[in-house]
Image (spheres, rainbow, N blue to C red):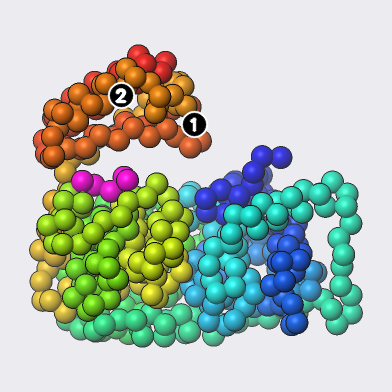
Amino acid sequence: MGRLFGTDGVRGVANADLTAELALGLSVAAAHVLAEAGTFEGHKPTAVVGRDPRASGEFLEAAVVAGLASAGVDVLRVGVLPTPAVAHLTGALGADLGVMLSASHNAMPDNGIKFFARGGHKLADELEDRIEAVYDSHRHGEPWERPTGAGVGRVRSYDEGFEQYIAHLLAVLPNRLDGLKIVLDEAHGAASGVSPEVFARAGAQVVTIGAEPDGLNINDGCGSTHLDLLKAAVLEHGADLGIAHDGDADRCLAVDHTGEEVDGDQILAVLALALRERSALPSDTVVATVMSNLGFKLAMEREGIRLVQTAVGDRYVLEEMKEHGYALGGEQSGHVIILDHATTGDGTLTGLLLAARVAQTGRTLRELASVMERLPQVLINVPDVDKSRVKTSADLAAAVAEAERELGETGRVLLRPSGTEPLVRVMVEAADIEQARAVAGRLADAVKAALG
């Protein structure tokens, strides 16, 4: 069996890759592994279980709940809520485990399972590996140790989670949103109920689109991966800004009043300045990945804010933040982590703080986002090459050095082997789009010649 856990839990096509049997088995295994690790010592364990609105989440939730309860874990079913809400409630309720059923921005047929440890933090890699090993051994016949009688877990709905999460978000806001008209695109996803409610309570005039989930329409032509509807709605309603989430609302992208996209790099730049102004940006440092636009790096340098860059993936951003006590980090995709108030990316929280900055300053989002200029970025995937030799090929190193000399300080080159496919990603940034395309094309040819 290949490794089930990826960088963001277990994902696959629901009822094909991710079956009820797998969901149940992993949940039982998780309970046993955490018990062995001493997490449940001295008390009856409790788990918080939530999901996004996908139709498959209904039977997968039932399987997860059954697995946990059969292993002696009491279960609080919080229903359809964002991933960061489940993480928050896991910590706020003192639960021993959190489980979220979602495939985030993936298409509807997919689903996923993500486990949170006590406090709402991602499970350590070694615990995930142990869960897989235990699941696999029992899948091949080793019997479970099963509680009976009063030892089995009890299951109840916890509808209070909706209000608790909203109260948490409102408590974080530095100022109200009165006077702002905001369009929210909920991707027919997990934030369809929470997000419009909290923005309205914060004082904004709210227009919603993509907020009618039917189990089948999640992420379908809407949300943070499809911004055209939001751009049109912002212009149609004369809104001050638009906010877009993905299916589980751990991401946030925005649109300014002119219909222009504001990406994760720009959101990070705006929030970094806002946090520093409130003395809430430790070491005047923000964390991002190596894929962040060079314009973001240049803007942070100009504003006197230090940028720490990590490998691609929000998990690496979070690890860096936790290790060094940084408060703000994220990715160009809109996955923004505000560690003082969330243990994972929280799209609703990010959108609220972005809108709060607009309300507080009286400046448009377009003006605030102009603190950085996005440099043209060209990405070319070069398939069917030996990606393992990216760092050792002398010919390729020479081609990269020549490209970097041509671009100077106003451009950047990044060659990155894919983590899942036999290809190399060539990324080039330059002040001029034509120059970026030309350099990227030459480098792609060099990759083929050197590694093909």
Alpha carbon of mark 2 to alpha carbon of mark 1: how far? 22 Å
Residue positioned 86% across, 60% down in the render = 144
Residue 54 in the image: x percent, y percent? 55, 59
The disc, 2 or 1, on the residue closer to the chain's N-terminal end is 2
Q: Secondary structure at mark 2?
A: helix
Q: Nearer the viewer, mark 2 or mark 1?
A: 2
Observer-nearest residue: 344 or 389?
Answer: 389
Residue positioned 85% across, 82% down in the render = 150
Which residue is tagged 1?
A: 421
The type of residue carrying mark 1 is: Glu
Q: Which residues are magenta?
A: 290-294
Q: Is residue 201 left or right of residue 59?
A: left
Q: Secondary structure at mark 1?
A: loop
> Quarter of the image holding residue 283?
bottom left
> Secondary structure of the magenta portion, mostly?
loop
Can the viewer see residue 26 in this picture? yes
Marker disc for residue 144: none
Is residue 198 found inside the magenta-colored segment of the image?
A: no
Q: Is residue 42 left or right of residue 336?
A: right
Which residue is tagged 2?
A: 397
